[in-house]
Amino acid sequence: MKGQSYDSDVSDEQWVLLEPLLEPESKKKGGRPRTANRREIVNAIFYVLKTGCQWRQLPHQFPVWSTVYVYYRGWRVSGIWQQAHEALHRKVRCTTGRKETPSAAILDSQSVKTSQKGGRAALTRAKK
């Protein structure tokens, strides 16, 4: 574990929920065995997302930026981030006494205004 903590770090309670949703250590195919701590990888990803820093500018307390980026991209491409988001969303709904998925949606016509002509014609001036 690194020495310094950041506001973006995952708490113990959050990690208990998130850890099983991430790719297990045993799923890696080929290559060297993993040495990076997945929690530190997640903390580094959240640090980048919260601060907006460049991957190469990650503080040295985190794993090497290229390792963090490879995990981030792999989880994004494989859909793990989306699956984790959906699972956590369902859990939050259940803990608040609601069904796992919404059963209704409301659309407000005022928030979907269009021009009379629409499309490209609405953006261009009429020639005289």
Image (cartoon, rainbow, N blue to C red):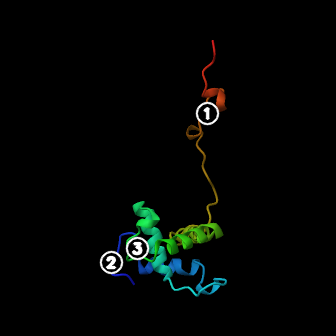
Tell me which amino acid carries mark 1: Thr
Q: Kindly identify the residue that appears in the image at 39 percent across and 84 percent down.
A: 1
Q: 10 Å neighbourhood of mark 2: few (<14), some, or many (≥20)? A: few
How far from the left and from the top, in percent, is residue 13? 44, 79
**In the image, what residue type sits under mark 2?**
Gln
Q: Which residue is mark 3?
A: 9
Residue type marked 3: Asp
Expressed as whole percent of the image width and height from the top left, the position of residue 46 reads 45, 68
Residue 62 picture location, percent across and down: 41, 76
Which structural element holds mark 3? loop
Residue visible at 50% across and 73% down?
68
What residue would you read off at disc 2? 4
Q: Which residue is mark 1?
A: 114
Answer with left or right where residue 62 lies relative to residue 83. left
Does residue 12 lie above or below 120 as drawn? below
Which secondary structure, mark 1?
loop
User: In front: 23, or 109?
Assistant: 23
Residue 88 visible in the snapshot: no
Do callouts 3 and 2 mark residues in contact (Cβ within 8 Å)?
A: no
First-in-chain label (3 vs 2):
2
Measure the C-alpha gap from mark 3 to mark 2: 10 Å
Distance in Å between CA atoms under marks 3 and 1: 43 Å
Secondary element at tag 2: loop
| Dot 3 crowding, Cα within 10 Å, few <14, some 14–19, many 20+ | some
